[in-house]
Image: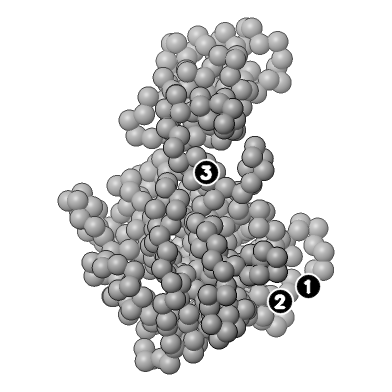
Amino acid sequence: MLFQKEKVKVLAHHTGRLAAFPAEHLLLSVQGSRGALHMGWHDTGQAEPDDGLGYHSILYLGETPLIQILGSGCPTCESLLAAGYGLPGDCNALQAVSAALGQPYAGLADAVARVRPILGLLQPGIYTLSYSGYYPTDGDGRFFWDIPEAPTPYKATAEYYNTENYGVLPCFPCFLYPAQGAGTYDPRRVAHYRRRLQAGEDIPPVLAYSLWGYMGVLLDGHHRACACTLEGKTVPALTISRPGRIWHEQVPYLLWPDGEEVPASSLTPAQQALLAHPAGKKHPGTPPSMEPCIHFRRAWEPAYRKAARQYPTCTDVGALALYPGIGLDADGLRLLAMDDDYEAPGLAAQLLRYAARQPGADAKGLAMAFIAPGYPAVLRQSAFAVLDQIKGDPEIDDLMISVLVNCERKDDPIYRIADRHWE
């Protein structure tokens, strides 16, 4: 039934402050909803498991498991993800939302009405509806729909801790995990959206549900995300998430996705009660035994895998959010690595590899700028790793031979890079 008794109210609007990741957000209260789309928590039966993965949860849509999550509960620790059975084809709410989102995007206020059938499937609570861009990868260079069968750790499920400045890198969820089986893939639909993108048209946003860390579960728009991948675009997305909370002197504050704080006292008592509503449901017994994700098996075209490698990883996007003014050229990376105001050579090394992967980049010239011994070791290693990917270049070959001849330590990472250059 599409006629539900849920009450959805817009409480506040916010424009994101992360220059590298422009986004717009609405704070919503949802009451009287059914709770069919929810995170189910299961008891693993292990009080202190050796692997630290004491939390087994499943994202459910009704009785259908969409995604399995094995985690430790630590926000900066990776979780393992495994696919469920794919989105049920008879979900009227999803069908209604898919049809509504197929129309041109007309702003967040209009989007609330379009995604209302999905909001009616959530548990009652306070939510954020955001409009932003996603990368169609898993956060580690793999095409989002090309997922392993076995439970696999995903870096994007954890908040990335930067040891150079002892802080968590800020980033709103911007990577995707599929909820639809690969058997629904239709290259004709992908070609349709590619033609629209090539013509300079905007395509409708996809719909994602924020999981953990920087990962979002794709509920609608898998073919649009495929088209964006092949065209090298970010994916316009509407994201449903639960706002974070933080306490200052025992006063609760809401966290917008970009980290800005708002006192929870701005909410009415009834809305504060919704904020405290549990984010999931406790399911009795151990989680159901599920077969490998046969619904997601497919030999994806090499073009998808190649295109995915050009997008930033979860570490890249954290660095871009933390240092939005840094240019992805030799001068900018040198500033990030060695200037007293920054001194983040690890992030500079990460961004060097990202910049070198971009279409049309002068990867050799950029890497050669940082091979001298005076640069931080981690930055030099990244420079040599970039050069190692370029085969058949006489200048690079001579450089690698010089390293093998002159390096005094065979356990030096740069020596090991040079030693395998011709493999």
* Residue at horizontal 70 percent and vertical 65 percent from the top: 249
Instruction: Choose top left, top right, bottom left or bottom right for residue 70.
Output: bottom right
Residue position marked by numbered label 3 in the rendering: 322
Rendered-image quadrant of the C terminus: top right
Which numbered disc, 2 or 3, marks the residue that appears first in the sequence? 2
From the viewer's perspective, is the residue at label 2 or at label 3 nearer?
3
Residue 84 seen in this snapshot: no
Q: In the figure, 316 relative to 96: above or below?
A: above
Q: Position of residue 278 (x, y in %)?
A: 62, 79
Q: Tag 2: residue type?
A: Thr
Q: Tag 3: residue type?
A: Leu
Name the secondary structure under disc 2: loop
Q: CA distance from mark 1 to mark 3?
A: 40 Å
Q: Position of residue 420 (x, y in %)?
A: 58, 22
Residue 46 seen in this snapshot: yes
Q: Is residue 206 found left or right of 200 in the rendered image?
A: right
Residue position marked by numbered label 1 in the rendering: 45
Return the mark for residue 258.
none
Which numbered disc, 2 or 1, marks the residue that appears first in the sequence? 1
Along the line of sight, the residue nearer the viewer: 192 or 116: 116
Along the line of sight, the residue nearer the viewer: 25 or 192: 25
Q: Position of residue 372 (x, y in %)?
A: 55, 14
Q: In the figure, 335 relative to 287: above or below?
A: above
Answer yes or no: do the residues labelled 2 and 1 have beta carbons within 8 Å?
yes
* Residue at horizontal 45 percent and vertical 50 percent from the top: 18
Which numbered disc, 1 or 3, marks the residue that appears first in the sequence? 1
* Residue at horizontal 37 percent and vertical 92 percent from the top: 3
Along the line of sight, the residue nearer the viewer: 422 or 168: 168
Name the secondary structure under disc 3: helix
Residue position marked by numbered label 2 in the rendering: 286
From the viewer's perspective, is the residue at label 1 or at label 3 nearer?
3
